[in-house]
Amino acid sequence: MVVCLHNRPPLERFRVLCTYCLVFDAIFTLIFALSGLSSSAYSVETSCYEQNGYSWHNILALSFIVSSVFAAWGGLIHGGVVVSGEGSPLKPQQLVGVSRYGHVLVAWTFLAAVLEAIATREQPLNCSVDTQSVIAEPSLGDLDNHALTKQHVGAIWQMASTILWLIWVIGAVAAAMSAKRNLPYLQEGQARQSEETTDNNAQMVGIPVQDEELPSGTVVGVATPALGGPAPTFQPTFQGMPVGLPVDGVCQGRPVRDETGDVSRPAGAPKEA
């Protein structure tokens, strides 16, 4: 696990840690479900409990079922983090859920341990299994036959399940602490990404003009003066005939005659000989 977390980004380490938690969530969902069903099943031991008025075995079976539900809940939370990626990015709500799950799991584990301790203490002596042979060494005949008794198998299973349970709880707590630590980094990264997306998106106002609709050489756009440059000057627009012509100008077209039939000349123009 240390090798997988080495030289990785913080969020990637968090995802790898949730992957390990997901594996143990699935394992203990099955273990607690089978333990609850086994404890609630009718057997010789259950019949002995009923004859002695002992009912804590039902509460113990219920605690196993609740633990199985908690393990399945953890699988959903950690699985959501594991499958997150480009199509489904990691959300801050998922990190908050992982952090809360670690605290809730620790609280329920403490409560389940108290219930199991009370159930074990209230168990009738004539219904309990003789535990002396569990911690005792095998007899010489067992060593010769290389066989393990039922008590030894139960002891090995209790030890293995306890170690796995400790790894599961410690992993869930570590994932909760990592989620709380990485939450500011995730929020900062998402804010930066949203700002970059806003800056890169250009805004267009009006109706775009297609190039095919314009003749060649047409300039599209509005010319504006450069910042800090001189203001543009606009030339006045005149419409109609000019009022006067310069003296030395050249007139083209038919001459204009007055009422007497003489060609009108501008004032000061020399007469023809």
Image: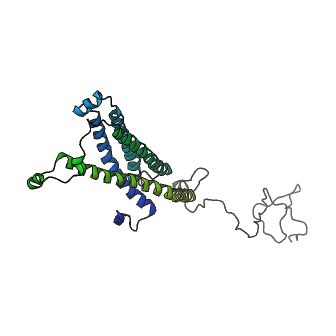
Position above or below: 19 against 247: above
On screen, 57 above or below 197?
above
Residue at screen point 75% across, 64% down: 252
Residue at screen point 41% across, 46% down: 109
Residue 249, position as x, y percentages in the image:
80, 70
Counting the numbered discs, the total is 0
Quadrant (top left/top right/bottom left/bottom right) for the C terminus: bottom right
Indicate the position of residue 141 as horizontal and vertical percent values: 10, 52
Q: Position of residue 168 (x, y in %)?
A: 36, 52
Residue drawn at (42%, 46%) of the image: 110
Relative to 153, is 248 on the left or the right? right
Which colour style is shown? Answer: rainbow
Residue 150 or residue 7, whichever sits in front: 150
**Residue 161 image offset from top left, x and y in percent:** 29, 50
Pick the quarter of the image with the N terminus. bottom left
Residue 245: quadrant of the picture: bottom right
Q: Is residue 138 left or right of residue 222?
A: left
Q: Nearer the viewer, residue 139 or 270?
A: 139
Q: Residue, x 66% and y 60% (percent of image)?
A: 222
Q: Is residue 76 above or below residue 260?
A: above
* Residue 206 horizontal side relative to residue 171, left or right: right
